[in-house]
Image (tube, rainbow, N blue to C red):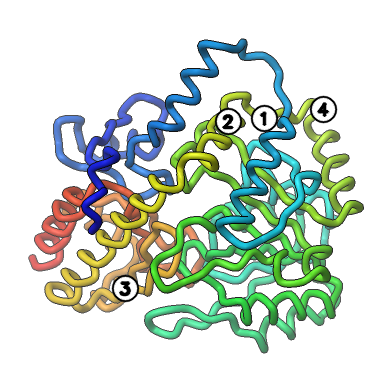
Amino acid sequence: MSNNLMAYDFETVYKRFNKGSHKWDELQEYGVNESENIIPFSVADLEFVTPPEIIAALKHELDTNILGYSNATDEYLECVCDWFRTRHNWDAKPEWILPTHGVVDAFFECVKTYTCEGDGVILTTPVYYPMYSAVKSNNRLLIESALLDMGDHYEIDFEDLERKASQGNAKLLILCSPHNPCARVWTRDELTRIGEICLRNNILVISDEIHCDLIMPGYTHTVFASISDEFANNCVVCTSPSKSFNIAGLQTSNIFIPNESLREKFLASLKRNNPNPKCNILGYVACEAAYKHGAKWLEQALEIINANKNIICEFIRREIPEIKIYTLEGTFLLWLDFRGLGLSYHELERINHYDAKLFFDEGYMFGKSGECFERWNLACPTRYIHDALSRLKAAYKK
């Protein structure tokens, strides 16, 4: 690990009991109190102190401005594009961006904008659970294309995807890229095959790329719209600084829609459902500060996440080899398969909560194929990883 890690504080944890954090308050339901050295590893925000550059920018804004209605400035939009240009080699244009309150809000809105009741929406499953809700709550037809479980990673079943895309009722594909919870960073070739299938079958791609900055060594994220003009004109790319810089509570995301007609439809739908769709004034400030000054902090956070992953993998291999771990290519969310322990997912959850005092996101939340899996949030000080592994070993070696 870099000697420069001490430049930022990655050791302090603010315990968020009784502060509106469901992630933290849930611990109390299982008898965990504030004095215990236990943190949750569930909901995907980071247990790292917010980057100081962002805090400084927010304080300056509070000291020098009023908290009135605010729109994205030209400087803000250019800053967002600069980040994707330098970080992801994508020459995005400011006029493509529509800020929204969040990526989840955006793909819900996309389902309402670009499909009608009864239309099919394809998900590659298991997948981030609000995507199921976006389909079902809007009375759309859920079309699951199950990922192929290769034992230590997942792959897209292109034969199945092609077959379901060609049936005629699918109008939309919601792509999770990088994939949550499976932690895949789709290759350019894989994304190209997805894009070609969707073009052939007149299916619009909604690409959720909220984890695009959280990429492990040896892997490269490809923005879906960057592959070709044809793909750019047939997609919506959903991004946010919220995961990368731990500012989800400021509810600011940037939705790229290069196709002007699609962009106008999205904005019209947004205004029908929310007549004044303005974002949080401090969210704009935080995003701009993150993209201008946060790269070094992000690199150091990624080092810790990668180190935490290595510690878990080595410990599990040595102490509890019945648990399988899937390769972490991107995100800060490790996907673990507990099926080798021979437990039902209900029993697994009970042991983790009551015996091990471990609080992951349960795999069944991501679909039936996630039963007996756990999603472990690695974005925390390493000492909590060691503590958790000790409790894990004690619980399963009984």
Q: Nearer the viewer, residue 81 or 167?
A: 81
Between the residue at mark 2 and the residue at mark 1, the CA separation in whole angstroms equals: 7 Å
Between the residue at mark 1 and the residue at mark 3, the CA separation in whole angstroms equals: 38 Å
**SS type, badge 4:** loop
Residue for point 78% across, 69% down? 231
Crowding at mark 1 (Cα within 10 Å: few <14, some 14-19, many 20+):
many
Res 374 → quadrant = bottom left
Quarter of the image where the N terminus is located: bottom left
Crowding at mark 2 (Cα within 10 Å: few <14, some 14-19, many 20+):
many
Q: Nearer the viewer, residue 227 or 389?
A: 227
Mark 4 vs 3: CB contact within 8 A: no
The amino acid sitting under disc 3 is Ile
Q: Which residue is identified by label 1?
A: 279
Q: Position of residue 122 (x, y in %)?
A: 70, 69
Nearer the camera: disc 4 or disc 2: 2
Mark 2 vs 1: CB contact within 8 A: yes
Between the residue at mark 4 and the residue at mark 3, the CA separation in whole angstroms equals: 46 Å
Quarter of the image where the C terminus is located: bottom left
Residue for point 34% across, 33% down? 25
The amino acid sitting under disc 2 is Gly
Residue 214 as seen in the image, left or right of residue 352: right
Between the residue at mark 4 and the residue at mark 2, the CA separation in whole angstroms equals: 20 Å
Counting residues from the start of the chain, the first of labels 4 and 2 encountered is: 4
